[in-house]
Amino acid sequence: MITSPAGDEGMEYMAQLHMVADRLGVDLRYAADRFAHRRYHHGPKRIYALSDAYLEADMITFPSLYEGFGNALVESVYFGKPLLVNRYSVYESDIRPLGFRFIEIEGVITDETVEQVLALLADPERIAEDARHNFALGQLHLSYEMLESRLRDLVG
């Protein structure tokens, strides 16, 4: 399920995703119009909070080639979900060195990637252990408390 608006990588990318999903028999759903920062009803249409998607997901993926710092990635860590991340430049420089336990790709999904994902999803204990590890790293490096401490150091 894609919960974010398409377009960051061009609409051709979305078309390619649909073609690959169709060819592989993957039920790909573009549902960005069904998610917002909070739940509400728009006439008969129910709009879900993005947190609803996080809670229901088995795994969250960030396969895109370009991302910003990674606020959605930080949110995924908060929700304790396994992550698959493409090693985009900001991830490489700012996030990867922190030591999170994610499945990483170099631009493409390989047979090895699929094996890693299947093994992880079949191991609830490892998922829980990785979630605890990642959450602790998130608190240490990416939390409001860390930001407050750093800002306090800067302004004296």
Image (tube, rainbow, N blue to C red):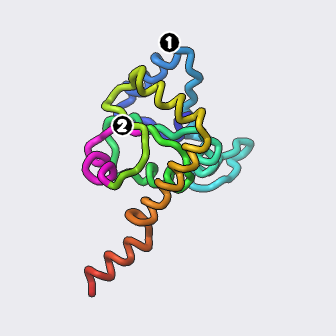
Residue at x-position 54% and y-position 38%: 59
Locate residue 34, reporting x and y percent: 61, 41
Question: Relative to residue 105, is residue 133 depicted above or below?
Answer: below
Q: Is residue 27 magenta?
A: no
Please name the residue shown 37% across and 72% down the image.
147
Residue 111 placement, left or right of 122 = left
Give residue 89's mark: none
Q: Residue furthest top?
A: 23
Identify the disc placed on residue 23.
1
The answer to whether residue 30 is above or below residue 68 is: above
Mark 2 / mark 1, whichever is N-terminal: 1
Front residue of this view, candidates 28 and 89: 89
Q: In the picture, residue 27 is in which quadrant? A: top right
Q: Is residue 88 magenta?
A: yes
Q: Which residues are magenta?
A: 85-97
Q: Say which amino acid is labelled 1.
A: Arg
- Residue 156 lies, with reference to residue 5, above or below; the image says below
Mark 1 residue crowding within 10 angstroms, few (<14) / some (14–19) / many (20+)? few
Residue 36 vertical placement versus 137 (above, below): above
Dominant SS in magenta: helix
Other residues around mark 2 within 10 Å, as few (<14) / some (14–19) / many (≥20) = many
User: What's the residue at 63%, 48% (across, down)?
Assistant: 55
Of tags 2 and 1, the one toward the viewer is 2
Q: Secondary structure at mark 1?
A: helix
The reply, left or right, for residue 91 in relation to residue 109 is left
| Residue 83 locus on image (x, y percent) | 47, 42
| Image quadrant where residue 10 sits | top left
* Residue type for callout 2: Asn
Quadrant location, the N terminus: top right
What residue sits right under mark 2 in the picture?
Answer: 86
